[in-house]
C-alpha cells in the first residue's frame, strides 16, 4: 500500500528568518528538510515529550528525502543583511554602553545579523512517499505539528499542519524532488538516527537525570520540614544523610550548554518541470511604451481620463503619417468607428497601487499598441512626437486646464519604481490567472435588471457583460467573476461616479472643469446623454493570461485597466 505524508506550513509574518550555514550574511532559502525536522524535534523537547510523538519522529526520519513545494522565485526576495548591536544578556561588565533603565550599569553590545527572506502568505510543504501508512504516527505528527511555533529564528513564526492533500504545484509554486545527480539545490537531509543525535547534542538524558534528582531533593526537603514529634530528630538525621547522598550524585553530573547540530549529509534537488498551460494573449501587445512624469502636479488616479484625452490629442496632432492611421485614431477614413478586429491604440494610466503605502497617484502613462501593428509602423507614426531628430527623446507637454501642465518622457531602462515596469501590468511572459481592476470597468451596455430590486439578476447580467468584454479583446471567458465598488488593490479609489457629468460629445467627454479626487469621471458614449455604469471587477481565468488587460467601453482611455494579483490566493468577496 502506497500513501503519502504531507507536512505543510506558512509564515505568519510573511518572513522566513534563518541563516545560511555557510555564511551568516546570507539567508537560507528554501528551508532545508533537516531544519524542518529540527523544528519538530524542538517542539517535542519544549513540551511534554509524548512517547507517541517521539516514535513518530523516529519513524519520519526513516522515510527518506521528501519532495518539497515552495513559492516561485519571483514571489520571494531576500532583504539586505545589516548588523544590529544587541546587548549581551548573560553578563554585565564594564563597557561603553550604558543601560537607560539603570544608569550605573553597563552592558556590552555585540553585532548580530538576522538574514530574512520575504515569503508572503504562500504555503510551503514537504511530502514523503509512505509504504504502509501507520495511523498512530499520523495522529502523533498532527499533534506535534500543532505545537511548532517557528522554523529558524524565534521571530520566524509559522503555523504547521499535516495536510490531507498536498498543495498543488501551480503557476504560483515550484516543486523540487531529490536527485542522485548534481541538482540545482543542495539541502541538508534527514537520516536515520537524526533524532537520537539531536538528543545527545541537547544533552537530554543528562538533563532529565539532573531534573529527576533535583525533584527528589526538593521532595525530601519538603517532607523533612513536616517531621515533628517523638523520634523526629533521628528521622531528620536520616533524611539529611539521604539528601546529602542525592546532592552528591547530582553534583557529579556535568551539565553543558546544548551544542549546535552540524549536519554533514546533503542531498541534491532538481526542479520538477510542471507543464505550463497555454498562455492566452489579448489583442493588445505586452510591449508597452512607457512615459514617466517629469514635471507637474501630483495627480490622483481619478484624473487619468483628463490626462489620457489630452495625450490622445497630442498623439493625433503630431502623428508622422497623414491621414492618421486607423490603428491610432480609432476611425476609418470616412469618419466611422474603426472596424479593426484588434482595436486601436490605447492610453493606459500607471498609478502607484497594490502596495501597503499606495495612494493611487499617477506615475506616468503607457501607449498600448495592437499586436498586429509592426514596430516599424509604430516608429514611423510616433517618431515626431517622441524623437528630437538627434537620437534623443523629447518631452511631451500636456496642458491640463486647472490641473496645470504635465511633461512626460520615455521611461529610463534603470527606472526602479515597480509601477513603471511593464511586467507589473502584463505578467509577461508566464501570465497570471487572477486579475483585479485598477480603474473601473465601464459597461458596454446598460443592464436591464434593476440593481437594487433585482440584485442577484443584476450581478449575473453584469457578469455576462464582463465575459463578453473579455472575449471582445481576444481573451478566454473567465471562470470566476466578482463585482464591487471597491477594488481588490490597495490605493485604488472606489468606482463612484462624479456628480457632474462630463460635457462634450467625444467618448469620455472633456474634464477641463471637472474636479478630481472625489470619484472617477462618468464615461459617456458619443451621442449619449447618460453616463455608462462603472464598477470594479475581479477575474480568475482557467489558464494564465498575459496583459495588458483593458476591457469595457472606456478601455482606449484607460478605463477597465487590470493588474495581476501576483502570488495571491485572494478570492471574490461575494
Image (cartoon, rainbow, N blue to C red):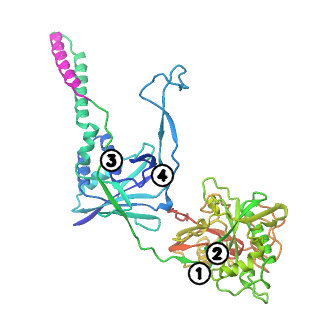
Point out which mark residue 474 bears.
1
Q: Which secondary structure, mark 1?
A: loop
Residue at the extreme front:
390
- Judged by its main secondary structure, the magenta piece is helix
Point out which mark residue 117 bears.
4
Quarter of the picture containing the C terminus is bottom right
Q: Which residue is mark 2?
A: 551
Q: Is residue 344 visible?
A: no
Q: CA distance from mark 3 to mark 2?
A: 51 Å
Q: Which secondary structure, mark 3?
A: helix
Q: Is residue 401 visible?
A: yes
Q: Which secondary structure, mark 2?
A: loop
Q: In the rendered structure, which disc, 1 or 2, sits on the residue that comes first in sequence?
A: 1
Q: Tell us which disc is closer to us: 3 or 1.
A: 3
Badge 4 vs badge 2, beta-carbon distance below 8 Å: no
Q: CA distance from mark 1 to mark 2?
A: 10 Å
* Side (left or right) of 482 relative to 260: right
Q: Tell us which disc is closer to us: 4 or 3.
A: 4
Q: Which residue is mark 3?
A: 38
Give the crowd class for mark 4: few <14, some 14-19, many >=20 residues within 10 Å. many
Give the crowd class for mark 1: few <14, some 14-19, many >=20 residues within 10 Å. some
Q: Which quadrant of the structure image shows residue 455?
A: bottom right
Q: CA distance from mark 1 to mark 4?
A: 38 Å
Q: CA distance from mark 3 to mark 1?
A: 51 Å
Q: In the rendered structure, which disc, 1 or 4, sits on the residue that comes first in sequence?
A: 4
Amino acid at each position: 500500500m502506497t500513501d503519502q505524508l504531507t507536512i505543510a506550513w506558512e509564515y505568519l509574518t510573511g518572513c522566513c528568518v534563518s541563516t545560511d550555514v555557510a555564511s551568516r550574511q546570507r539567508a537560507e532559502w528554501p528551508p532545508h528538510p533537516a531544519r524542518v525536522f529540527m523544528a519538530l524535534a524542538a517542539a517535542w523537547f519544549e513540551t511534554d515529550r509524548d512517547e507517541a510523538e517521539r516514535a513518530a519522529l523516529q519513524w519520519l526520519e526513516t522515510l527518506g528525502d521528501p519532495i518539497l513545494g515552495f513559492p516561485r522565485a519571483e514571489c520571494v526576495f531576500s532583504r539586505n543583511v545589516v548588523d544590529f548591536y544587541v546587548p549581551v544578556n548573560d553578563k554585565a561588565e564594564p563597557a561603553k554602553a550604558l543601560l537607560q533603565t539603570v544608569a550605573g550599569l553597563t552592558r556590552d553590545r555585540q553585532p548580530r545579523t538576522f538574514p530574512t527572506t520575504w515569503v508572503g502568505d504562500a504555503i510551503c510543504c514537504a511530502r514523503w512517499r509512505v509504504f504502509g501508512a501507520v495511523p498512530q504516527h499520523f495522529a502523533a505528527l498532527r499533534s506535534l505539528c500543532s505545537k511548532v511555533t517557528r522554523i529558524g529564528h524565534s521571530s520566524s513564526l509559522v503555523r504547521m499542519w499535516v495536510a490531507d492533500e498536498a498543495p498543488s504545484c501551480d503557476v504560483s509554486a515550484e516543486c523540487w524532488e531529490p536527485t542522485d545527480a548534481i541538482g540545482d539545490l543542495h539541502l541538508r537531509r534527514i537520516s536515520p538516527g537524526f533524532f537520537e543525535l539531536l538528543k545527545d547534542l541537547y544533552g537530554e538524558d543528562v538533563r532529565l537525570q539532573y531534573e529527576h534528582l533535583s525533584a527528589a531533593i526538593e521532595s525530601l526537603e519538603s517532607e523533612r520540614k513536616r517531621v515533628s514529634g517523638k523520634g523526629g530528630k533521628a528521622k531528620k538525621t536520616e533524611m539529611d544523610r539521604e539528601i546529602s547522598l542525592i546532592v552528591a550524585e547530582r553534583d557529579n553530573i556535568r551539565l553543558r550548554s546544548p551544542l549546535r547540530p552540524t549536519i554533514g549529509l546533503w542531498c541534491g534537488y532538481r526542479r520538477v518541470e510542471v507543464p505550463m498551460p497555454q498562455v492566452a494573449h489579448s489583442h493588445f501587445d505586452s510591449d508597452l511604451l512607457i512615459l514617466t512624469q517629469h514635471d507637474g502636479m501630483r495627480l490622483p488616479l481619478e484624473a487619468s481620463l483628463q490626462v489620457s484625452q489630452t495625450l490622445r490629442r497630442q498623439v493625433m496632432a503630431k502623428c508622422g503619417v497623414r491621414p492618421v492611421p486607423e490603428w491610432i485614431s480609432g476611425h476609418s477614413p470616412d469618419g466611422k468607428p474603426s472596424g479593426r478586429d484588434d482595436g486601436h491604440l490605447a492610453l493606459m494610466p500607471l498609478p502607484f497601487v497594490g502596495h501597503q503605502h499606495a495612494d493611487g497617484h499617477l506615475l506616468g502613462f503607457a501607449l498600448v499598441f495592437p499586436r498586429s501593428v509592426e514596430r516599424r509602423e509604430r516608429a514611423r507614426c510616433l517618431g515626431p512626437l517622441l524623437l528630437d531628430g538627434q537620437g534623443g527623446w523629447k518631452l511631451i507637454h500636456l496642458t491640463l486646464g486647472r490641473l496645470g501642465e504635465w511633461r512626460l518622457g520615455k521611461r529610463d531602462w534603470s527606472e526602479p519604481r515597480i509601477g513603471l515596469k511593464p511586467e507589473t501590468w502584463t505578467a509577461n511572459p508566464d501570465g497570471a490567472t487572477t486579475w483585479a481592476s485598477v480603474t473601473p470597468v465601464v459597461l458596454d451596455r446598460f443592464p436591464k435588471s434593476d440593481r437594487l430590486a433585482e440584485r442577484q439578476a443584476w450581478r449575473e447580467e453584469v457578469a455576462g457583460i464582463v465575459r463578453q468584454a473579455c472575449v471582445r479583446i481576444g481573451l478566454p471567458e473567465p471562470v470566476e467573476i466578482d463585482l464591487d465598488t471597491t477594488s481588490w488593490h490597495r490605493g485604488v479609489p472606489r468606482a463612484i461616479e462624479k456628480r457632474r457629468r462630463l460635457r462634450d460629445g467625444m467618448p469620455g467627454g472633456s474634464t477641463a472643469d471637472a474636479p478630481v479626487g472625489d470619484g472617477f469621471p462618468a464615461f459617456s458614449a458619443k451621442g449619449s446623454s447618460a453616463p455608462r455604469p462603472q464598477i470594479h471587477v475581479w477575474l480568475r481565468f482557467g489558464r494564465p493570461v498575459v496583459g495588458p488587460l483593458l476591457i469595457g467601453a472606456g478601455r482606449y482611455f484607460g478605463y477597465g485597466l487590470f493588474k495581476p494579483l501576483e502570488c495571491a490566493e485572494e478570492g471574490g468577496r461575494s
